[in-house]
Amino acid sequence: MGRVKMDLEVKPDLYVSKTEEEGFKELTPFEKQVMRWIAAGKGREAIAEILRVGPEGIKSHRLNIGKKLGINSVADITRIWMQLGATDVQEFNEGSGI
C-alpha cells in the first residue's frame, strides 16, 4: 500500500472585529511599536530598553493599546498584530532605530 501524507499543521482563526480594526487605526506610531514588541514576546523591561523609555511608560502605552482595541491580554495583542500590524513592519522599523 502507498503511504498517505497528512498535513497536521493547525492554523488558528485570527478573527479581528470591526471594533479592534477601528481601534488599531487610532493607535499612535509609538503604540504600534510597543504592540509589535509585545507580539514578539518581549517583556516590559526589554521593550523599554529597545525603545529607550522607562518601563512605566511601556505599561501606560500597553494600557492605552488595550483601551483603544477593547482588549486586555497579550494573546489578543498578538492576534491583532498578526492580522493588522505585521503588514506595516517597515513603517515601524524606520521610526524605531531597529
Image: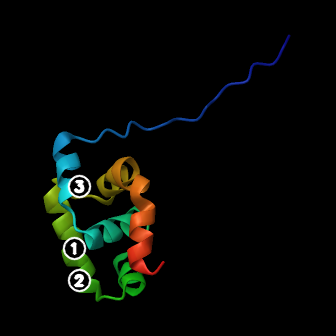
Q: Report the Cα–Cα distance between label 2 and label 3.
A: 19 Å
* Residue underneath mark 2: 57
Residue 5 quadrant: top right
For the residue marked with disc 2, what is the amino acid?
Gly
Helix, strand or loop status at disc 1: helix
For the residue marked with disc 1, what is the amino acid?
His
Asked whether, in this view, residue 55 is left or right of residue 39, the answer is left
For the residue marked with disc 3, what is the amino acid?
Phe
Of labels 3 and 1, the one closer to you? 3
Helix, strand or loop status at disc 3: helix
Asked whether, in this view, residue 54 is left or right of residue 36, the answer is left
Q: Residue at x 86, y 10 (%)?
A: 1
Give the crowd class for mark 1: few <14, some 14-19, many >=20 residues within 10 Å.
Answer: many
Asked whether, in this view, residue 70 is left or right of residue 83, the answer is left
Helix, strand or loop status at disc 2: helix
Q: Report the Cα–Cα distance between label 1 and label 2.
A: 6 Å
* Residue underneath mark 3: 24
Name the N-terminal-most of marks 2 and 3: 3
Asked whether, in this view, residue 15 is left or right of residue 24, the answer is right
